[in-house]
Amino acid sequence: MNKLLSILFVLFIVPNVVSQNSGSTEIGGNLGVSFTKQIASGSGGGIGTNSNTRVRFNLAAIAEFYFSDAFSIKTKLIYDQKGWNNGRITDTNNNVHNTGIELDYITLPIQANWYFEGTRNWFIGLGFYGGYLLQGKGDNAITVTEITDSFHKGDFGYAVSFGRKWWLNDRLRLLVELDGQGGFNSVVKNDLGALINNNRLSVNIGLMYRLQ
């Protein structure tokens, strides 16, 4: 009898649980506070030492597709403010500037999310991002053109997240997450042999709406 009940559970109950969210899609957005800096490594001296953290913001549109109640693929389109404080940069004319930097990107991360624990509200995400530099600015009277032209347009690296969702009704959920990015490529053109990466950690809050 116990074997029969076990077989019935596997055949009928488990597939219903797994497919509860299968094929579901959520769309939404978030606003976040970003703590961003650059990290320099290698033998060069394009910026010299690691910079101090700068507080900036990000604004994102989100789409998430569920394979089951435990796994999903999430992508964002982010207006992503990055930069640092108290850094040193050598521009394309070999002039050295001690300045804070603001870098504004459009960023597209793609992550695989795992929803754990019983209610499937907590999640961990891991994936990659690609970013395109819109504009750069410096604190110390350096022109926008000088800063923007000193950086590569492309920025790519890993993306991680950890967070929770709360149901507000049968379709709308509140989202709170920690969202991290770490660059793989050197973003400064005249890096003098150093590897100079963008790094940021954001605290985000948003809303997600389930389409089906």
Image (cartoon, helix red, strand yellow):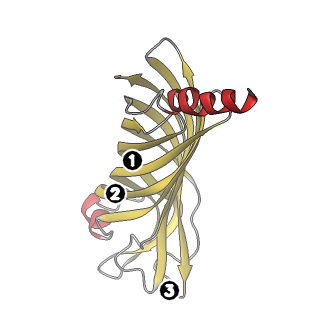
Q: Are marks 2 and 3 in contact (CB under 8 Å)?
A: no
User: Mark 3 highlights which residue?
Assistant: 44
Q: Judge from the rendering whether residue 201 lies leftward or rightward of residue 156; answer left or right.
A: right
In the picture, the disc for residue 131 is 2
Distance from Cα at disc 2 to Cα at disc 3 = 24 Å
54 or 39, nearer to the observer = 39
128 or 137, nearer to the observer = 128
Q: Is residue 84 above or below residue 122?
A: below
Distance from Cα at disc 2 to Cα at disc 1 = 9 Å
Q: Judge from the rendering whether residue 107 lies leftward or rightward of residue 2; answer left or right.
A: left
The amino acid pointed to by label 3 is Gly
Which is in the foreground here, disc 2 or disc 1?
2
User: Mark 1 highlights which residue?
Assistant: 80
In the picture, the disc for residue 58 is none
Q: Position of residue 123 (x, y in %)?
A: 59, 39
**Tag 1's secondary structure?**
strand
Which is in the foreground here, disc 1 or disc 3?
1
Q: Are marks 2 and 1 in contact (CB under 8 Å)?
A: yes
Q: Position of residue 93 (x, y in %)?
A: 29, 80
**Tag 2's secondary structure?**
strand
Pointer 2: residues within 10 angstroms few (<14), some, or many (20+)? many
Which is in the foreground here, disc 2 or disc 3?
2
**Tag 3's secondary structure?**
loop
